[in-house]
Amino acid sequence: MTSGPHDGDGPQGRDQHPPVHSDIWVPPEQLNRPAADRPAAEVPAAAAAGAGAAGGTAVLDQSPPAAPAGRHGSTDRRRSERRLAYWLVAPAAVVMALVTGYPIVYAIWLSLTDANLRDPGEQKFVGLSNYGTVLSSNYWWTALAVTVCITVVSVLIELVLGMAIAMVMHRAMFGKGLVRTVVLIPYGIVTVAAAISWKYAWTPGTGYLANLLPDGSAPLTEQIPALSIVVLAEVWKTTPFMALLLLAGLALVPDDLLKAAQVDGAGAWTRLFRITLPLMKPAILVALLFRTLDAFRIFDNIYVLTAGNHDTGSVSMLGYNNLFKAFNLGVGSAISILIFLCVAIIAGIFIKGFGASAPGSDDEGR
Amino acid sequence: MSSLNRRRAGWTIVNLLVVLYAVIPLWWIISLSFKSTGTVTDGNFIPTSWTLENYRNIFDTGFFTSALINSIGIGLITTAIAVVLGTMAAYAIARLEFRGKKLLVGAALLIAMFPQISLVTPLFNIERRIGLFDTWLGLILPYTAFALPLAIYTLSAFFREIPWDLEKAAMMDGASPTQAFRRVIVPLAAPGVVTSAILVFIFAWNDLLLALSLTSTDRAQTAPVAIANFTGVSQFEEPTGAIAAAAVVITIPIIIFVLFFQRRIVAGLTSGAVKG
């Protein structure tokens, strides 16, 4: 299949894919195709990737496995190549496993105990009662509802706005360079700094935006207005990222197709909904996945804008407060694990949406 | 002709809207930072009287300066480690055949999506126990772990585009392996390495949650934490100008950097995420 270690890709691989260029989105389905007709010897690795998605700790199994049974010939070279690969990969794998895999296992253990920071010596196994405490508490459900609202609303706005900005970057008659440059400003701003800008913009008496409101209103001290401002700050900061991802997808929609449709009498909206968007589906899904998971862990903006007061705290905020205000490690860990499960569920839903073409499921065969 | 003009005008307006969108919040905080204590609450978009007082004030308190030093030090060390480890791993992923490659890529993707709050409680406890709490290393380690997926994805996307055959060609023309590597491969790989270094640095520079949770004093507290928790001399007076100045100080260098390396960052961001 692959003709030699230093060719990288098999010859068919090269023929099927255009040379990979960072500005060009390659639909995952296409990338996946060669994976399907790869020889059986490579299947275990594919299965392993699935297992990898189940838990970060799996990276620990990076020790060189025994030589694969199905392969003969030029094994020495293969083996030395593999050994080099393991040496190169090991440090990164170890760091990632130590810092994420081990603590998450430890968090699972902590969540089953009544550990807290007030009397560190005492630690009793309490079973699932911490989860009971969290799941029967209003704080958790409020925080979850707030987080889900922020996530859904901001990601939807970002999608529409990001699509619009991507269109501008793609189609503008002039000034493309300028637009592509300035949209990186929100990306470059430190989230805390941007949040402070929004906070003072909405602080009565100080801000240009608060001054537009009727006298006496303090938007950051009421739940819905405050959440709207949080969404605004989040959308402002991350829409450019969305726009750039969508732009990469937009570049793949063939102009000829759009022109042909136009000749056939399709209006601009028809072209957008019938041609552009369907062809961009993979890019849109990836962008949505990344942004949804990112928005779900929102912390910085809320910490600065409202500190979670007036029922505006996200689940991340709740986890943080539980540790540093209530000093409760057990309950805090239970919250951590629950958030982790939420993220896993969201990711799972998206991966289902991708079908087999989830990012990372194929990859490197090309 | 007039329809062309109209389209031109239309695009000018659209472009202008995008520019305003990006610039207004930034301008607002810059404007605040130059206002004097007397005018900071006037709500004006442009300072009526300009002053550097706020900037002098934040650097007079050793507190912000040390946070800035911590941020720069931690950011640079994280970047160095993540880029070196990431380059090694990305080279293996892009060029070598080995089992567990998909596992590694999947795990990296998982970590990229990981909710950091899930690690805060256990990491806090572990770091206190082994004495890493409130130290540079205590932040560098988690930053590196979270930055590695970013570095690996960006770099392996870049490495796949390098025409490695050039190395062989150079050796055929009489270059030694070292020369071939130094003169041919390094220049080709450098843009990718620089890009991933920038992205990693921005990530480390930007973080609030981990820095907030894993530090407690000016030994390791980073600038975003200092700004988020900044309280003035008196608790009744919000030090708006000073906070704004501090926010500008930590933001402007990054923005200049981002605009300067614009193309690379766009390529890196989309390759890291889209190609994932």
Image (spheres, coloured by chain):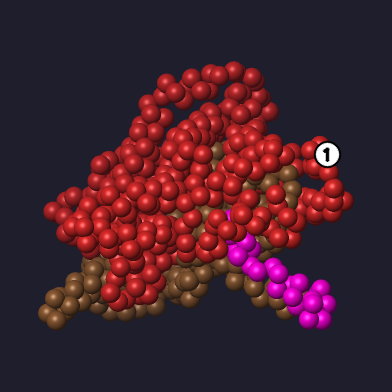
Query: Label 1: which residue?
Result: A66
Is residue A272 or residue A219 the one in the foreground? A272
Is residue B105 or residue A264 the one in the foreground? A264
- Residue at the spot x=60%, y=18% of the render? A126
Can the viewer see residue A214? yes
Image location (x, y in percent) of residue A106: 65, 33
Q: Is residue B82 magenta?
A: no
Is residue A166 or residue B168 the one in the foreground? B168
Image location (x, y in percent) of residue B251: 45, 67
Q: Which chain is brown?
A: B
A77 horizontally vs A133: left or right: right
Query: Which residues lie in the magenta part?
Result: B153-179
B135 horizontally vs A82: left or right: left
Circle 1: element type: loop
Judged by its main secondary structure, the magenta piece is helix
Task: Give the total of numbered labels.
Answer: 1
Of all chains, the one bearing label 1 is A
Q: Which chain is red?
A: A
- Residue at the spot x=81%, y=51% of the render? A78
Image quarter of residue A54: top right
- Residue at the spot x=52%, y=69% of the render? B264
Image quarter of residue B172: bottom right
Query: Which amino acid type corresponds to the residue marked 1 in the rendered image?
Result: Ala
Can the viewer see residue B124? no
Image location (x, y in percent) of residue A147: 38, 39
Q: Quadrant of the C terminus of chain A?
A: bottom right
Instruction: Tell me the crowding category of disc 1: few under 14, some 14 to 19, or many 20 or more residues within 10 angstroms, Cα based.
Output: few
- Residue at the spot x=14%, y=54% of the render? A215
